[in-house]
Amino acid sequence: MPALVNYSGDNDFYSGGPFRSGDSGIVLSIGSNVDIYCPPRKRARISGPLVVEGSVFEDKRPSIDMLPDECLFEIFRHLPGGRERSASACVSKRWLTVLSGVRSAEFYRSKASRGQSDDMNVDLASNNTESISADEDLEVDCDGYLTRCVEGKKATDLRLAALAVCTSSRGGIGKLSIRGSNSIRGVTDLGLSAIARGCPSLRFLSLWNIPSIGDEGLFEIARECHSLEKLDLSQCPSISNKSMVAIAKGCPNLTALTIESCPNIGNESLQAVGKYCTKLQSITIKDCPFVGDQGIASLFSSASSLTKVKLQGLNISDYSLAVIGHYGKSITSLFLSGLQNVSQKGFWVMGNARGLQTLSSLAITSCRGVTDLSLEALGKGYPNLKQMCLRKCCFVSDNGLVAFAKAVGSLESLQLEECNRITQTGILNAISNCKSKLKSLTLVKCMGIKDLSPETLMLSPCESLRSLSIRSCPGLGSTSLAMLGKLCPQLHHLDLSGLCGITDTGLLPLLESCESGLAKVNLSDCVNLSDEVVFSLARLHGATLELLNLDGCQKITDASLGVLANNCPLLNDLDLSKCSITDSGVAALSRGVQSNLQILSLSSCSMITNKSITALKKLGRTLVGLNLQHCISIGSRTIELLTGNLWKCDILS
């Protein structure tokens, strides 16, 4: 028989045999004939199966996870508020998925919960493997809408579901941007559908470069988000006309639409938008091969509220431009680019249709149909045109530019870029013919501009011109600058960046002609300019000069800094990058009258050393930005000291 050993107290050992009723002790075997009985001392913490003497005791407690999704759905829709929904979504990915399937209108709202507001932030977790902060980067914009931008690896269905659940009690997301997508678990129709169900008050939706989102996601947006005002689709190849028609029918408040590089969206979508979206004010269509004349004509003949239009890289013909010219009575801004199938006739008809009476801004890029004849027609057809921009229009010459300048009556800004048939003669005549209104002239990479002899032209000055920008036009020389100075005596802003051919002697007459005082001067990469130009600027315009950019002017030395320091009290932005500046120049600048200097760039000034720390500290009293990048003679310790002392200033090093 088994041996029986008794001890006094509670720690008793018993041999095998029946136990008392309700006893829940543990029997341990220590030998072939001896068992030890241990009475219970604490409540067991193990909830899983317990194996004792070869037997298995399973946990028979019921679990809510055994219920099907339909039952969980019904339970979750009775949760009283956002706190409870967020807490439930933390349990598992399954619970989060079920919760994200409940539409905002399907939640049961009792009288007590209707007046409650819950702003609790909750971190959602799925299966203890991923933690998501639903309110991370969540902002409230000036209109009072919750705003969120999800990019790259953060763009997943799980994150969108979390956003929908956690913000549903606060009205949901108002503005959502999804850019890029997680390469492993990217955004699909499931995530977008969760946003639609949880955020019916969505006003702005932007989808960029998301090939995994198709029609189903937009179908759900159309069914739920009837307040949608702005839709931006870019590089979404899986979205087709079917969902766009649904959007047009379900979102009548749409005011702005952008469709870019979506190959499956075509004429049918534009026809529906024109028919149902009567409040549409702005539309951008770019690189959509199936958009043609039929879609454009239907859109513009129906959408009478359009004010801003951008058409780029489309297979449309002269017919579309004729329709725009006739029906675009409310258009104020028009941008046309890369319309290779539009001829001279299309632009001529658009101008002569006389429907664009309110047009104030026109930009045309890389359109072969823009010629001298069509440009003149555009000038005559738009009496209220104030801004005109021509880029890469290779068939426009001096005759067309001058005819346009004579025809248009209210032009204030003219920009010409890579229009290589336009010469100096055309520019000067255009300025003279726009003398009553023109305020800004910009020329960029116009290779046809070359010097003329002083007696070639006799023109009256343009008293209204305030801003002159001539960038990267290598043919412009000293004679041209002198003539421009006589034509533009009231300049405030002067930008001659990238003009390698101009010299001190050529620029001086222009500076002397500016009667009202220059405020902003950009001479970056004018490599032949020296200290003499800075001396003239300080002498003639020191009292008004606010910005001076000398980036890349290697002949500028410390002497210029001393003159600027003593003669330019209003100077607040100074760029001396790549100039021949030393510690002496920085010290001279710090001793000057620059009480307004806020931005100082000394990038790539290799002769500035640690000795300038005292002068830089003094200048730093007013600075908000200091650029010391590529200053190889300034040590890291000096940068650390400056950073510690100039705590109001952003230092680039």
Image (tube, rainbow, N blue to C red):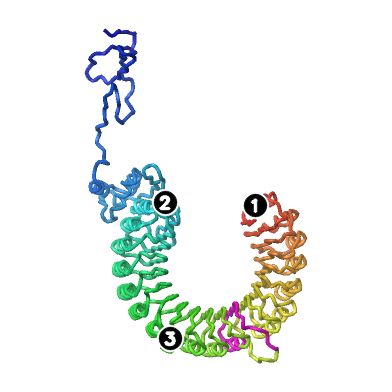
- SS assignment at label 3: helix
Query: Which quarter of the image is occupied by the N terminus?
Result: top left
Left or right of 139 in this view: 481: right
Vertically, is 44 above or below 404? above
Task: Please say if the residues under marks 1 and 3 sit with CB atoms less than 8 Å apart.
Answer: no
Query: What residue is at 56 percent from the left and 80 percent from the top?
Result: 416
- Residue 432 counted in the magenta span: yes
**Are there few (<14), some (14-19), or many (20+) residues within 10 Å of tag 3?**
many
Side of 381 relative to 530 (left or right):
left
Counting residues from the start of the chain, the first of labels 1 and 3 encountered is 3
Q: Quadrant of residue 125?
A: top left
**Nearer-the-camera pick, 207 or 504:** 207
Q: Are marks 2 and 3 in contact (CB under 8 Å)?
A: no
331 or 69: which is nearer to us? 69
User: Taking the image as drawn, is residue 481 in sight?
Assistant: yes
| Location of residue 422 (image quadrant) | bottom right
The magenta segment is 426-453
**Is residue 144 visible in this depiction of the protein?**
no
- Any mark on residue 643, and which? 1
